[in-house]
Image (cartoon, helix red, strand yellow):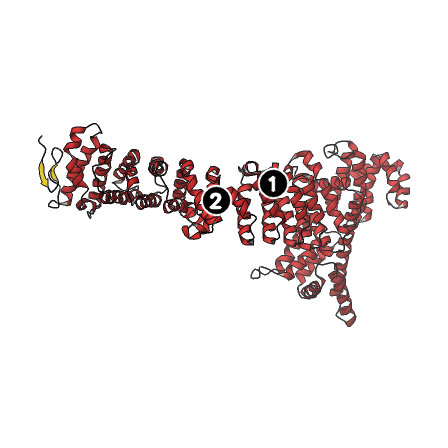
Amino acid sequence: MAHSKTRTNDGKITYPPGVKEISDKISKEEMVRRLKMVVKTFMDMDQDSEEEKELYLNLALHLASDFFLKHPDKDVRLLVACCLADIFRIYAPEAPYTSPDKLKDIFMFITRQLKGLEDTKSPQFNRYFYLLENIAWVKSYNICFELEDSNEIFTQLYRTLFSVINNGHNQKVHMHMVDLMSSIICEGDTVSQELLDTVLVNLVPAHKNLNKQAYDLAKALLKRTAQAIEPYITNFFNQVLMLGKTSISDLSEHVFDLILELYNIDSHLLLSVLPQLEFKLKSNDNEERLQVVKLLAKMFGAKDSELASQNKPLWQCYLGRFNDIHVPIRLECVKFASHCLMNHPDLAKDLTEYLKVRSHDPEEAIRHDVIVSIVTAAKKDILLVNDHLLNFVRERTLDKRWRVRKEAMMGLAQIYKKYALQSAAGKDAAKQISWIKDKLLHIYYQNSIDDRLLVERIFAQYMVPHNLETTERMKCLYYLYATLDLNAVKALNEMWKCQNLLRHQVKDLLDLIKQPKTDASVKAIFSKVMVITRNLPDPGKAQDFMKKFTQVLEDDEKIRKQLEVLVSPTCSCKQAEGCVREITKKLGNPKQPTNPFLEMIKFLLERIAPVHIDTESISALIKQVNKSIDGTADDEDEGVPTDQAIRAGLELLKVSTLVVKLTKIYYCLLLIIIKSKKIFISLSHMNIPFVFLLILKKMHTYIVEIRLNIYNFVS
């Protein structure tokens, strides 16, 4: 078929077979139909088709005219862009367009068409993808290197690609975009600050969260071009950090965010930047040092970071900031320690000496956070912290500030529960922290009521959790009691004694309230309230709250009845929990989230509630002692000699008389004594009433009958 020909000012235009002239004299639909045929022709041509290249040269020039580049119809523009992309491929390496202005117009035009990639569901998406694939494969934009306006062209291209990328695109789209942009960086002579900004802006947290796909694209591009782009990144940070020229880029205020992101992408991008950070760590500006410390904390502490081993001078310089004169900087370093201990146990030795100094810091907040950092790491894995670090926490249980003491005590309690009770890391870990139980109970000797109350709460929640099933709870108490040192045993006994005395004081208060009101009874009630107040935190407020609570008890019979059950000698552990729950529920106010009055009454109820020992618990404890005598207990697994366990069990039963009636305990002790003569002998230095021992001596003839009776009782 003959080629149709027509004339323009530049010469004859030859169209492919079957394609008539394309001009403004035809309809849009017809123009699209003819352009599709032209697209097909150029698509099928290759670089070796010299004759066809010469034949369609004028058509190539015609398609680059303003008529097409500025055409209002997007379908026409897309088809023309596809033609132009193929023309650059066919005529490479020399394009048929020689005018710099025309080349700029063409590439800006192609860039605008790439915006069509955004809609992946468009019927024309495949053609937009073809356009991208073509210019990426041919590296068409590299022609612009020699143009004066090349930076404007490249910057617009980058902005367009970063703006259109979305989660609807497949890996091929992502790959072609990276190919296209990386060729400009790797094969060009320079990367302008403006072009660099179009890449780096996608790493800024606000942009990163807004468009995750653009972040991934920038990340892939930087990885691909790391070697080529590194000098320009170094120059940018040098200008901002060292020379203070923040005006060179709108991203100057985000330099530390960018450094962190770039380090995570490829540490080689910052080879020449890290020494600048070491310099900044010694800045005279407190805020500047603080920013660098925060940045390096994230870089050193990151899970897969090797920065500390790769850059030891920077690491040592950073450690020096633990002794910084500026409090927020020391605080930031201490907070960093937990992440470092958890992610890099090998650095624990370096951190230990600095944490030791900070554990004695004059600032309360820093001492507090030293504890938090160590405990956080220990709770993740006890092997992450050495004995020195745990000892720092131990020392802080005697800190002059209550907030620090409380954090240290609670931290040790949590560690103890995880590794001693729950055996989260085996026997070795349990042995490593076995001292904690004694240390916590020793604190009961402190004069501060706050410390004593916290020990009671820790004992009930962490050392012998009250919510355990009865048998398990008594087993836990049995072996704990058997392994405590003498001072800890005395402290625990004193704790139970104090709780029991307070329980009696509350019972006396209830008895006084029930009496007819007289001047004498009012004075007696006030006197009793003052006694109870001394057993609560913040006596000033406690006095007012106890007066209020006394009035509640007078007015509300239901609450009074619940409290009477709670302080009754026959109250079981389950009943106690129910009473506490009901009383706090009635006193609570849903509209008042923070209720100091209720919190104070909770302290009182916690102290007087028998949550560990009742008649059922005693039976379980006796069975546990019997198992030790019979050799069926877990004494060996618990690391407690049997004799030691039995002696402790008997002592514990004796102490339990604070809660359960004496006669019942002694009656139960009888079974154990009968079963083991050795234990009978050991009772000589227990404070068992002499009359009771004499009775036992006379009971040999009735042993069989009594054993049967006792077995029935225990069951």
Regarding residue 388, the answer to whether it shows in the image is yes
Dividing the image into 4 quarters, which one contains the C terminus?
top right
587 above or below 429?
below
User: Is residue 469 in view?
Assistant: no
Q: Which mark is residue 259?
A: 2
Crowd tier of the residue under label 1, counting other residues whose Cα lies within 10 Å: few below 14, some 14–19, many 20 or above:
many
- Residue at (28% x, 34% y) in the render: 138
User: What is the CA distance from the residue labelled 2 to the residue labelled 1?
Assistant: 23 Å
Q: Say whether residue 505 is left or right of residue 419.
A: right
**Residue picked out by circle 1:** 341
Amino acid at pointer 2:
Ile
Q: Secondary structure at mark 2?
A: helix
Q: Quadrant of residue 340?
A: top right
Image quadrant in which you'd find residue 385: top right
Closer to us: 517 or 625: 625
Image height of 388 relative to 555, above or below: above
